[in-house]
Image (cartoon, coloured by chain):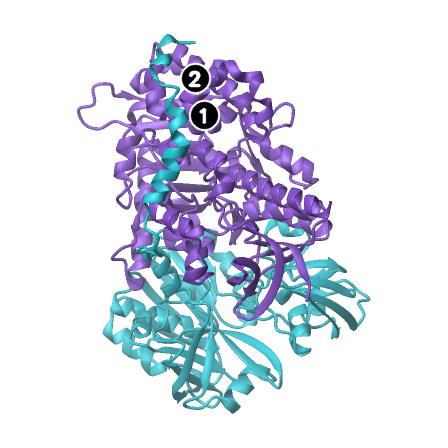
Chain colours: A cyan, B purple
Amino acid sequence: MASNLNSLKAKKFLSMLPERQARFNEGKAELVEIEDNAMALAKALHPKRQYLKIEKITERGEDCRSYTLVPDGEKTKSLAYFGAGKYLTVFETIEGMPVTRAYSISSSPKESLEGRYVLTVKLVDGGLVSKYIFDNWEVGTEVEVSAPSGNFEYQPLRDAKKVICLAGGSGITPFVSMAKAVADGDEDFELTLLYGSRSYESILFAEELAELEKKCDKIKVVNVLSDKGVKVKKGDEKGLLTAELIKKYAPENEPYSVFICGPQQMYDFLGDELLKLKLEKKYIRHEMFGEFHNPSSQEDYPEGIPEKITVKVRIQDEVYTVEGNSADSLMQTLEKNGISVPARCRSGECGFCHSHLLSGKVYVPKQLEYRRLADYKFGCIHPCCSFPLTDIEMEVPTAK
Amino acid sequence: MKTYDVIVIGAGNGGLAAAATCARAGLSTLLLERHNIPGGSASSFVRGRFEFEPSLHELAGVGAEDGKGQIEDMFTRFNADVDWHTHDSTFRLVVPAKEGDKDAFVNENGVSVTIDARMPVGFESFARKLDELVPGSYESCMKAFDLSERMFKAFECLDDLKKLPGSIKDLPDIMRMVSHTMKETLDALGMPKKAQDIFSTYWCYMGSPGSKFDFLYYMAVLHSYVKDGTGIPRLRSHEMSLAIDKVIRDAGGEIWYNSEVTKVLMKHGKPEGVVINGEKEVYGKYFICNSSPNTVWKDLFTKRDIPEKQLKMLNTRKIACTLTTVYLGMNKTKEELGITDYSVFIAPDSDSDKQYEAAQNYFSGYCIINCLNEIIPDCTPEGTCQLFLTTMTFGDVMKDIKPQDYKRFKTKVAEDMIETCEKALNISIKPHIEEIEIALPPTFARYLNTPWGTPYGYMLEKWDSMIPRTVQYLQDQPFDNFLFCGASQERGDGYGCAYYTGEKAGGIVVKVIEKEGK
């Protein structure tokens, strides 16, 4: 061994233990709060829940309403800031049945600093939650929501400087927020909105969008109307959101991103149209698909699946056995039986409902497949998009 | 009301190992986790067609010839099913040249650098390579490895002091290594300064610079990387965490997710139970806690129940570094991008103390770039690859950042890091980003619930280093039925360290309960 290693004193070791305890002994015996802005930011941006109340209701045609939500002033004093495009999950209990729905925020990020979110809800045919909201939400009603969530957002390092936004029906809501953010200078990109509606009467946010377009030269709004008899105003278009139409408004010699939000049929239709544009995958971004229904309509859905199934579920130390229908997701089945399940996006994507499948088989529509690789290996599922094919035994985390 | 033998608080790596140890020994075990998945840092997340590894760079103790590396050995003993991929290089260190640097040269990427060191596995190969880069460093490098080889043998004595006489002749040298810093020891071994800089490239894994941590601690990491190479699980760390989750369940243990401990219940000056999510009480005889002591004392106890020594410890120790990571799903292959290494450390300065000082600011130009496809070629779809860039910072660096500034700040930091890598490797990254996620200290704070979002626990300084922490582990614990495990404990950060402390704490409880039974 090198002789000069001996220049280091081995005996120093012997003093280490007493020195360490002596150092501790010198410490203050008080609970000193350390300044922690990282944690403070984390808590401000991602509160577990936000407790709000309705301040104002705006009618938008016959079957659509905007609800302005403000802090309840007790449990929630200020609102979590968010990036335009995010959604809030609303928690409700309808006749003893815990339910959740995700709604895009249609107000601007800036408005959240002023203590205001706007959620715009369209009455869905046969929709349980939207009907409940229409029947029960009034000025003053208390509403519990999640932190702003989701990944449908402009990202300057990934997305092109020019974005063609394709909206259908109430899918306009995240784009209203994005356009406002662009106008406020909180986002920096050129936003061309191709907004598909049936007729002028069914356009949502028509005035607001026209005003934003006037106010900010980075914003362009084109209404695309599909009803046959419609007389189209100057600057608007007739027909559907086709590849040709996108090309017409897209820049020629520079990259552009396409952002999509609308009903399922629109996604299906656009899938083929976008292929024609031969865009790189990175330039196509879509909002989540929303809750999935009728799994048996899918091509790869197996045959001979029984209608009635039994679900045995363990949550912490409690076990419930309930009856359900194979047409409902496991999440819906549990909720229909009065059992609360952790839920956020209800579209497979966020993984908030991550659970263990202990026995039985499920069907997951492939477009909602966002599980982690190891989840397949160890039998983990997202109940919001898992449809039972057999009787099921599962373990679900508690909905806190 | 059921009373569990053991309640484990937190399903990070330490908590998972502790719960698995207790459940496998037949104790009634309840593992409580505030998130909906296990692992803490050891997890994964999906964006588009990519699944990202959130924190793991590489595992020491996987892929050893005899399969007896520490981590692999634990998974084998647990009968936990993980598909390991191994890698037989260590790191590449690139130090871009500054104007006027006399020793600058142009490297294979066409970049002017002062150091470009791609270090192989194997003591002999490593030392030869070091000597090639810095002539005259072979001997000191081999001496350092020889010291650590002997030290590893002595390590075994830590758990069983009766074995000590066997290696008594090594004792003085081991005492020297434990009580002196990395820098002091390498100086004494006569290693040239530039060789020391290369030799200590992994310093950032320790969370403090080479003049602060002891030689033995650093060598524990470097030695095993150089000896056996490194490994990584095929399906991201989520595979490791779910594998242990299964071990616990199979052994009859319970794991409750979304179940945050919000209070510890006391009886006669000792913990007797916990409150979950502010409403549900569960009771236990023993407690193993994988949470940060800072969070535990602040949030789970009333002031009068906190042992005085614990407060003194909190106020004496420094919080270790915190991280920023940029995750990139690329729409080009690594070959198309021109990436040739799994792990490149890009340093604005080769001296770890200078790097450490620079890291007190937000982004100092220090960046590690990893490409997972180098180890797992098909970890992303065809025609793509995934990268992650990491930098570390010390202190409460989020000061003055308001929620409304955060997105812009995040994007700026990510852009700086990406540009640093582009320049240092002369490659193009920005135009090919298909997915990006940026995790800053608030992100880690949110998921780990630690001060400043540190995944690293407390700084391992010379006076509070691994060996004294290990020797004094029991006397540092707050109650005789409440033990800590994880990054805050004797071995500091790292997956292997956390598993070790968890398994050890679990083992202590198993032994005590066995004794009680008799």
The outermost residue toward the front is B268
Estimate the spatial distance between the alpha carbons at disc 1 and disc 2, rounded to whole Å.
8 Å
Q: Residue at x 53, y 31 (%)?
A: B60
**B429 lies above or below A200:** above
In the rendering, at what x and y percent does residue B110 appear? 32, 25
Residue bearing the label numbered 1:
B219
In the rendering, at what x and y percent does residue A268 appear? 57, 66
Q: Is residue A372 left or right of residue A77?
A: right
Q: Is residue A204 left or right of residue B471?
A: left
Residue density around tag 1, few if under 14, some if 14–19, many if 20 or more, within 10 Å: many
Of the pair B6 and A256, the residue shown nearer to us:
B6
Q: Which mark is residue B144?
A: 2
Contact flag, marks 1 and 2 (Cβ < 8 Å): yes
Mark earlier in primary sequence (1, 2): 2
Task: Indicate the quadrant where residue B136 lies.
Answer: top left
Secondary element under disc 2, as helix, strand or loop, is helix
Say which amino acid is labelled 1. Answer: Met
Res B494 visible: no
Say which amino acid is labelled 2. Answer: Ala
Q: Which mark is residue B93?
A: none
**B376 lies above or below B91:** below
Q: Chain letter for mark 2, please.
A: B
Q: Residue at x 21, y 23 (%)?
A: B101
**Total marks drawn?**
2
Q: Chain letter for mark 1, please.
A: B
Q: Tell me the quadrant of the picture where the C terminus of chain A can be found.
A: bottom right
**A187 lies above or below A214:** above
In the rendering, at what x and y percent does residue B321 appear? 36, 43
